[in-house]
Image: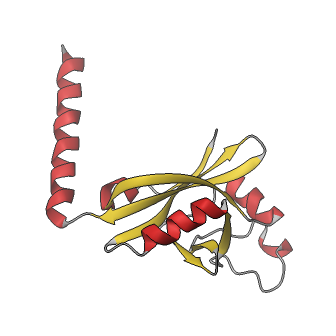
């Protein structure tokens, strides 16, 4: 399982409540671009419409600029491949007050490209400060242990 693209600020900006694994509908050059380490999940989210789930605002740049199809949109909506039960669960959670569904990472699982999707709640400013403080104290403790 090789991580291709990560949303690094997700754990800082959001409180993760539940995660799902989904397939991602991509074209061939998009897969090559992701395996090349290009792409971004910043500002992306998931919507459920008409019994299907879509990843919105996921940036996948063209693999080779001159060989991309005409009219290629790098931030197009990409369909998530989930079971009906999982889609129904996500639709129910999407209606919850203050909850959002965001992609956390895109990774390889064998020959397939998968996306890890999480149901999250946004953190308040004081929660972000607390997580920063906890991270810094843990870092200082590790440094103190290494200096011994």
Which residue shows up at 18% across the image and 65% down it? 125
Looking at the picture, tell me which residue is in the foreground, 90 or 131: 90
Up-down relation of residue 7 to residue 134 (above or below):
below
Quarter of the image containing the C terminus?
Answer: top left
- Count of marks placed on residues: 0
Residue at x 16%, y 37% (from the top left corner): 137
Residue drawn at 62 percent across, 77 percent down: 75
Residue 25 screen position, x and y as percent: 73, 65
Where residue 136 sits in the image (x, y, percent)?
Answer: 19, 42
Residue 30, quarter of picture: bottom right
Q: Could you say which quadrant of the image residue 2 lies in?
A: top right
Q: Nearer the viewer, residue 49 or 8?
A: 49
Q: Is residue 39 visible?
A: no
* Percent coordinates x, y for residue 102 in the rendering: 47, 65
Residue 111 is situated, as x and y percent measured from the top left of the image, at 78, 44
Task: Decide if residue 48 is on the left or right side of residue 118.
Answer: right
Task: Please tell me which residue is depicted at 83% across the width and 62% down the height of the picture.
Answer: 28
In the orientation shown, which residue stands out farthest toward the bottom?
71
Question: Horizontally, is 114 left or right of 126 in the view?
Answer: right
**Residue farthest toward the top in the current orientation of the protein:** 148
**Residue 44 to residue 146: above or below:** below
């Amino acid at each position: 399982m090789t991580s291709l693209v990560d949303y690094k600020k997700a754990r800082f900006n959001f409180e993760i409540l539940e995660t799902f694994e989904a397939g991602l509908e991509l074209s061939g050059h998009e897969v090559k671009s992701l395996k090349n380490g290009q792409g971004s999940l910043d500002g992306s989210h998931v919507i459920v419409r008409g019994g299907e789930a879509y990843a919105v605002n996921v940036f996948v740049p063209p693999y080779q600029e001159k060989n991309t199809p005409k009219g290629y949109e790098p931030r197009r909506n990409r369909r998530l491949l989930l079971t009906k039960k999982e889609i129904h669960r996500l639709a129910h959670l999407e209606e919850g007050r203050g909850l959002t569904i965001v992609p956390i990472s895109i990774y390889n699982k064998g020959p397939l490209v998968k996306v890890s999707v999480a149901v999250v709640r946004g953190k308040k400013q004081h929660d972000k400060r607390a997580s920063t403080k906890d991270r810094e104290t843990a870092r200082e403790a590790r440094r103190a242990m290494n200096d011994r």
